[in-house]
Image (cartoon, rainbow, N blue to C red):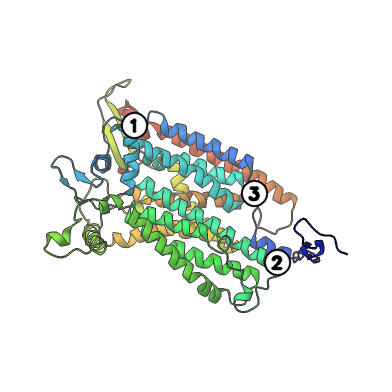
């Protein structure tokens, strides 16, 4: 007789049937060489690396924030961008405050909105319109430290790269001025950093697939990692394209980098498949990643359009109702997009025909040579120790650093080819993407300035750090030896000496980066080339 439960049902009937538990499948032993190629870097949180990066960032912050309000008044193109940022706060669109009409401008609004945040927080004054550039400049130093650590697998080299940028005159001056290019550089560097994280995530995905018993040599879906909302969606890649959209929302020259991002995605994805043992890595990359690349481009476009939100929501922005003003019919949404497209065509016409001579214009082949820096501010009012006096804010890269770029780039190519190193390729492509398009525009005599090279600077600095690392370390896989140890010691001493030399050079030029009043003789001593005057 069976016992009854309180509900009158036999106990045997409610007890679940016994099922033997299945032990988890053991992880497949992936060959160490394959594992090392897929996940060569330990990305776990490292407290000491963050402390080191924080120290370098603190140095950058102190340099950029001390006496940020000097010089007083608007310097160089602050006349335009600080004023337009204030107009955005008042009207939501660029506005001619003197004539009380919508203003035609040729750059998208995001950079000016970022300047406007500072004006909203601290007022319409020097601190207000410069603080956003300073914060973004400081943040870019921290980003470079982390990007450098990931690229080189070395906290020391990552922090060395960040310190070099912290002590660069052009980055320093642009971080203390309400111009757009520091925001452009920040978003492009953020996009590159996100793409590095995407590379790591996608390669870890392939490794996990192989450890779970997956066979990359099989054809079709069974030979690929499974799709999932968490692990299959390349979130970091989409974030990279979102940052690219933000960069476009600052300046259209960010468009040069879109092809760079897509090229890196293709190269890195094919490389991951080749490392995993996929039979046709390039074909499979195209089949698997085309959709995600298109999705990234869509994210970029939507992000860019979002930077025009103030213009879309207004009825008074320049050209906002152009079709209606010309007697046409404006359809909802489509009409606004068509009006924006016509605005863009007008702005493109301006940029493509800009050939007006300017005192401080320069050509791309002069930029690494520091052939023609830009004077942001000048005063001879004093006081100083012995008149006549001079005070200047000169946009000039730290000479020792910038002239070393000329050496680092060919060495980057040499070591990269000799070691077949993907890092050298990524760094070199980044630098070339930022510089080479301007050589094309130079054939049309377009007016250009030295600060157009700012987006290239993080990659140029990374090139220096890469070469320092290559000089200090033997070829990967080479056997340990006393000669290798001596090479590390000598290389470390040379790298340390180089950093000290850059720091001393920056300190020497610091007065003309910050507009300090000095004797005319002291100012003239810093004009090493006639073209700097």
- Depth order, front residue of 190/25: 25
Q: Secondary structure at mark 2?
A: loop
Q: Could you say whether the residue bearing mark 3 is in a helix, strand or loop?
A: loop
On the picture, is 400 further left or further right than 85? right
In space, the residues marked 3 and 2 are separated at their CA atoms by: 22 Å
- Give the structural element (helix, strand or loop) at label 1: helix
The residue drawn where x is 61% and y is 68% is 226
In 3D space, how far apart are the residues under numbered discs 1 and 3 (Cα atoms)? Answer: 39 Å
Question: Which disc number belongs to residue 497?
Answer: none
Q: Which residue is mark 2?
A: 212
Q: Which mark is residue 122?
A: 1
Image quadrant assignment for residue 397: top left
Q: Quadrant of residue 444?
A: bottom left
Please say if 439 is above or below 282. above
From the image, tell me which residue sits under label 3. Answer: 44
First-in-chain label (3 vs 2):
3
For mark 2, does the 10 Å Cα neighbourhood hold few (<14), some (14 to 19), or many (20 or more) residues?
some
Between discs 1 and 3, the one toward the N terminus:
3
Quick one: 58 or 242, which is closer to the camera?
242
State the residue at coordinates (12%, 59%).
Answer: 325
State whether residue 422 appears in this view. yes
Picture layout, residue 47 above or below residue 11: above
Cα separation, mark 2 vs mark 1, equals 55 Å
């Amino acid at each position: 007789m069976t016992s009854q439960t309180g509900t009158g049902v036999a106990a045997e009937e409610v007890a679940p049937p016994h099922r033997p538990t299945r032990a988890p499948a053991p992880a497949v032993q992936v060959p160490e060489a394959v594992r090392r190629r897929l996940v060569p870097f330990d990305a776990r949180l490292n407290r000491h690396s963050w402390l080191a990066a924080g120290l370098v960032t603190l140095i950058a912050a102190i340099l950029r924030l001390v006496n940020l309000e000097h010089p007083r008044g608007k310097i160089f193109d602050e006349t335009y961008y600080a004023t337009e940022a204030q107009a955005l706060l008042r009207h939501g669109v660029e506005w001619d405050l003197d004539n009380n009409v919508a203003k035609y401008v040729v750059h998208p609004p995001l950079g000016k909105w970022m300047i406007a945040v500072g004006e909203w927080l601290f007022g319409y004054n020097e601190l207000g319109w410069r603080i956003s550039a300073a914060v973004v400049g400081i943040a870019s130093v921290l980003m470079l430290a982390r990007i450098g650590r990931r690229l080189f697998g070395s906290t020391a080299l990552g922090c060395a790269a960040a310190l070099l940028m912290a002590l660069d005159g052009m980055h320093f001056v642009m971080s203390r001025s309400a111009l757009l290019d520091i925001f452009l550089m920040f978003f492009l560097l953020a996009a590159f950093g996100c793409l590095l994280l995407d590379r790591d995530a996608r390669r870890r995905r392939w490794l996990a697939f192989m450890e779970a018993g997956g066979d990359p040599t099989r054809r079709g879906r069974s030979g690929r990692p499974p799709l999932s909302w968490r692990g299959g969606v390349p979130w970091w890649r989409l974030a990279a394209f979102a940052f690219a959209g933000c960069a476009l929302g600052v300046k259209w020259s960010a468009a040069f980098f879109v092809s760079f991002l897509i090229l890196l995605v293709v190269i890195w994805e094919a490389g991951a498949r080749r490392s995993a043992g996929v039979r046709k890595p390039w074909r499979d990359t195209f089949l698997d990643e085309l959709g995600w690349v298109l999705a990234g481009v869509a994210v970029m476009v939507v992000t860019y359009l979002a930077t025009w939100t103030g213009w879309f929501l207004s009825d008074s922005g320049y050209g906002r109702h152009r079709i209606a003003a010309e007697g046409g019919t404006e359809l909802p949404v489509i009409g606004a997009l068509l009006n924006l497209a016509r605005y863009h065509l007008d702005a493109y016409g301006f940029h493509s025909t800009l050939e007006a001579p300017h005192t401080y214009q320069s050509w791309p082949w002069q930029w690494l040579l520091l052939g023609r820096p830009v004077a942001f501010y000048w005063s001879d009012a004093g006081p100083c120790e012995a008149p006549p006096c001079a005070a200047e804010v000169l946009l000039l890269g730290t000479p020792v650093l910038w002239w070393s770029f000329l050496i680092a780039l060919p060495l980057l190519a040499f070591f990269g080819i000799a070691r077949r190193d993907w890092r050298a390729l990524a760094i070199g492509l980044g630098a070339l993407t930022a510089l080479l398009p301007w050589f094309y525009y130079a054939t049309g005599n377009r007016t250009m300035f030295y600060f157009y090279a700012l987006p290239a600077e993080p990659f140029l600095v990374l090139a220096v750090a890469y070469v320092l690392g290559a000089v200090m370390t033997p070829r990967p896989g080479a056997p340990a030896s006393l000669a290798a140890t001596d090479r590390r010691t000598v290389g470390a001493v040379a790298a340390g000496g180089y950093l000290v030399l850059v720091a001393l050079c920056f300190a020497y030029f610091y007065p003309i980066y910050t507009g300090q009043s000095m004797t005319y003789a002291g100012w003239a001593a810093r004009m090493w080339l006639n073209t700097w005057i």
